[in-house]
Amino acid sequence: MKEILKFRQSVKEFCSKYDMIITPVVRFILYLIMYMTLNSMTGYSTAFGSTKVAVLMAVISAVTSDGIGLGLGALLLTGQLFSANVEIGAVFLLLFLVLYCAYIRFFPKASWIILFMPFFYIIKFQYFMPILAGMTAGFTGMVPAAFGCIFYFFLKHTADYVALSSSSAEGYKYIFQHLVQDKTLLLTIIVFAVVIVLTYIIYRMSFAYSWYVAIITGGVVEIILFLVGTLSMEVEVSLA
């Protein structure tokens, strides 16, 4: 345990010493991954889906604020969705504007949770997100976690709608109907909110290795809640 703590301290000292170089590089890599992930989930527009566009946006995001990064991500998705269906693109833009006006402008540092939720879903690591959000953003992480889930399921249902080229339903009606009826989405939002609060409370307690306890407790509680939810709400959630 002491060796782990020494290693963590040495890493913190190294990062602090070369912060001017490391931070932009890490931010560039993370934002590039995020933008490429969004393109892989949509791919309706070759212009917005270009690798050059993703690299350029990642460079801008690396040297600016998280709010700018989120705005560029929203711009990318809006362009992609408008290319798929005008109604769906307009609905997404409206949702983002509501989120920005009601939350992001006041808590910009928690916007990364929204940005990387789709990536965590793709790599099948989404259930660690509420633990990470609770330890980094605290109570303020509940709203972006919820919207991150909503945006992911929004993109998922959009892909389903586009695949059903013979569907006569209007785009926005199809998306809203499936979002409202999606019990998996509802269960995920509730469980994530509980885990974020619990993890943050334990993490902030002043006892040795509180962050270890926060991770373990948050993980166990999350498994239990999803298990109870799958049985009571009759939804399919992989507990693997």
Image: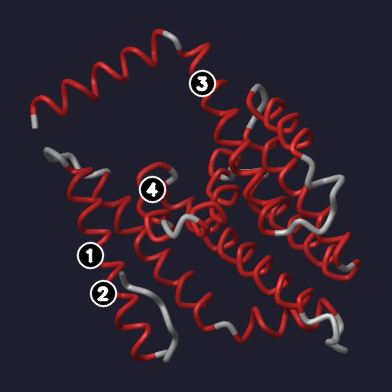
Mark 2 or mark 3: name the one nearer the start of the chain. Answer: 3
User: In the picture shown, does residue 105 fall above or below 29?
Assistant: below
Residues under numbered marks 1 and 2 in contact, where contact means CB atoms less than 8 Å apart: yes
Q: Quadrant of residue 34?
A: top right
Distance between mark 2 and mark 4 Cα atoms: 18 Å
Mark 4 or mark 1: name the one nearer the start of the chain. Answer: 4
> At numbered mark 2, what does the secondary structure look like: helix, strand or loop?
helix
Distance between mark 3 and mark 1 Cα atoms: 33 Å
Residues under numbered marks 2 and 3 in contact, where contact means CB atoms less than 8 Å apart: no
**Circle 2: residue type:** Ile
**Circle 1: residue type:** Val
Mark 3 or mark 1: name the one nearer the start of the chain. Answer: 3
Q: Which residue is mark 1?
A: 220
Q: Which mark is residue 23?
A: 3
Residue 182 place in picture, x, y as percent = 58, 82
**Residue situated in front as seen by the camera: 221 or 162:** 162
> At numbered mark 4, what does the secondary structure look like: helix, strand or loop?
helix
Residue 53 place in picture, x, y as percent = 79, 36
Residues under numbered marks 3 and 1 in contact, where contact means CB atoms less than 8 Å apart: no
Residue 197 place in picture, x, y as percent = 36, 58
Residues under numbered marks 4 and 1 in contact, where contact means CB atoms less than 8 Å apart: no
In screen coordinates, is 135 left or right of 28? left
Residue 10 place in picture, x, y as percent = 25, 16
Q: Which residue is mark 4?
A: 132
Distance between mark 3 and mark 4 Cα atoms: 19 Å
In screen coordinates, is 229 left or right of 182? left
User: In the picture shown, does residue 113 fall above or below 22?
Assistant: below
